[in-house]
Each structure stands twice: as structure tokens, then as C-alpha cells.
Amino acid sequence: MKKIFSILLAVIMIVSVLVVFVGCDKGKDLPTTTLTITAPDGAPALALGKILDGETPYNVKVNAQVVSSTELSAAVLKSDYAIVPANLAVNLFNKGKQIKLLSVVTNGNIYVVGNMTDKTNFEDMVGKVVYSIGQGSVPDMIFQSILKSKGIEYVTSDTPVEGKIAIKYVSAGSQGIQSIMADKGKGILSYAVLGEPAVSAAKSKGASEQFDIQAEWQAVSGESQKGFAQAVLVAVGERCSDDELNKKMVEIFEKNDSYVVQNSQSVIEKIKEVYPSSSLPATLPSGVVERCNIKTLRASTHKAYIDKTFDAIMQINPQALGGKLPPADFYF
């Protein structure tokens, strides 16, 4: 009897150990294949820093890829995770795609520069041409929202319009810089809405920084957090329901906030390894990465901050979100 009891006790102990072991194995449901994460070219790709450096959840291999903005939507749907413009995340969700917003990773890197030396007011842009990147993008709609909040009228136009700001869209920051500097040579005052690192490039050519759009948005929105939800980290497909893995991914991105500032050169080199045609310059002047506002804000604790961006977009162009705001289960 004692022998049978000892055997039973040993079996119970072994089963207990196995249960504890399995319960602690948070990565047990991970696929045996490589996880894929996609990011758009430009400043938001800097958020990949830690992953490009080899830090991954549960030591599972993660394939990080950077693509052009025109390839992003298609690439996202073939990925496990992605960094996308905030409005694209909602748009895909509203089209029935499996998307879950985990966190904000870029909180606005947009500034207005001018070809004048004096500091001006928003009202001084009335009657002038403002060259702007990213027509229909989150920064573009935030800029328009700020103008509306200030009671300033605007119109899309290639030439100045009396009593209004004439927004002329350009394909790249470099084109905006060339345009305002060409105007300066003609004695014409003009402005450009640019993102970093193009802003620093413009200043090196003699342009002056006039407005910090992140600070202006904070002022008109009443938000305590400076900036807006420009680019976000999302889970895609079956990853949407993988809570433990999603938590780990967000933690890695949180570690990257300070890492990318301290290791910007290394991060840029790694981005160019996976995407040689990246628009990011080979080196960035001191302080530029900080101005790119790569900061991870969890959706679970910053939903109100994110919602203010979506509310603003709805007022400018509802179709940019697919016609409606996302429900609560869109957020992780």
C-alpha cells in the first residue's frame, strides 16, 4: 500500500510541475514560423529600432520590413504587426479587416517653416501659399483642424487667395523646401508644412521654424499630452486575440523610445539594410530624433488622447476613417 501511495504521490507532483510549467509558458501558442512586422518609410520606421536590433518576444524571430506608403496597405494585411497612419488603422478595421490598435508610436513630427526671418502668427499665413506634404494624411487633417479652430479659412490652390490660406500640396518635403526657397528668391513670402527630418534640412538652407504643430494641437484640443496620434502599432489577423504576445510587443516598443534617441545612427543603418531606398538621411543632426516624437502610448491608457485625433479627422474627412469612429473592441 505504501508503495502504491508513493507512486501516486510522485505522479501528482509531476503533473503539478507540468501544469505550472505550461501555465508559465506564455509563448506556447506562438507560430513556429517567423512573425512579420511592417512599417512605412520615414520617421515612423524609427520605432522599429529595438526589433531591428534583435529584441523579440519569447526569442521568436521577427522579420521587420519597411515599405513605401503606396505599398503599405497591401503589406499590412500580410503581416502579423504593423506601424500605420492612425486613420489607415481605422479605415482597414471599418472595412472588415482584423485590426487591433495596441499603441501610438509616433506623436506628431510636423512643423511649419517659412522663408522669412521674423516670427509670424497663424493669421500672417492668410493670403500666402502654404506648401504641404501628405494630402489627406493625419498631419494634414490636424493642420486643417487647427486652422478651423482658429477661424482661419483655407483653400487648395497653387496661387495666393485673398482672405484665405492657399494650401498647395507637394509630393515630398524636399519639394516644399525648394518651393519656399524659390519664392524667397522672388521676394515672395511663403510657408511649408513639413515633417522631421525635412524641417531640419529646411532650416539648414535658411528657412525659419514658425510653428510646432504638436504644441498648436495641444493648445486647441485641450489635451494634456503634447502631440497627436500620427502613427500607431496594430496587431493584424489572428494576432489580434493573442493578448500575451501583444503585451510583449508593446513592451519592446516602450523600450525603443529612449533606445532610438541614443542609437539613432545604428537604427538608421539597420533600416537602410532592410530598405535601401529609405528616405531617411544617412545621418541626422543632434536633436532631430527627439523631434520625431517616437513615444509609445498604450491604447489601454491613452484612448482619450487617440480619440481626439479621430474626432478631428471625422470633422475634416470622415471617409479617411471609413465613415465612422471605431468601437471599443478596436483598442487593445
Image (spheres, helix red, strand yellow):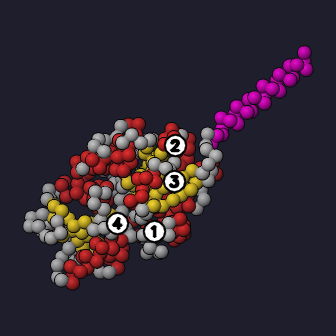
Q: Earlier in the sequence, mark 2 or mark 3?
A: 3
Secondary element under disc 3, as helix, strand or loop, is: strand
Quarter of the figure with residue 130: bottom left
What kind of residue is marked 3?
Answer: Ile
Secondary element under disc 1, as helix, strand or loop, is: loop
Q: Name the residue beneath numbered marker 3.
A: 37
Q: Earlier in the sequence, mark 3 or mark 4?
A: 3
- Give the label, 4 or 2, closer to the camera: 2
Evaluate if marks 4 and 1 touch, with contact meaning CB atoms under 8 Å apart.
no
- Asked if residue 272 lies left or right of residue 143, the reply is right
Q: Name the residue beneath numbered marker 2.
A: 239
- Asked if residue 161 lies left or right of residue 67, the reply is left
What's the magenta region?
A: 1-28
Q: Earlier in the sequence, mark 2 or mark 1?
A: 2
Q: Name the residue beneath numbered marker 4.
A: 195
Evaluate if marks 3 and 4 touch, with contact meaning CB atoms under 8 Å apart.
no
Instruction: Give the total number of marks visible in the rendering.
Output: 4
Mark 3 to mark 4 CA distance (whole Å): 23 Å
- Asked if residue 80 lies left or right of residue 304, the reply is right
Q: Name the residue beneath numbered marker 1.
A: 278
Residue 9 is one of the magenta-drawn residues: yes
Secondary element under disc 2, as helix, strand or loop, is: helix
Mark 4 to mark 1 CA distance (whole Å): 15 Å
Mark 3 to mark 1 CA distance (whole Å): 17 Å
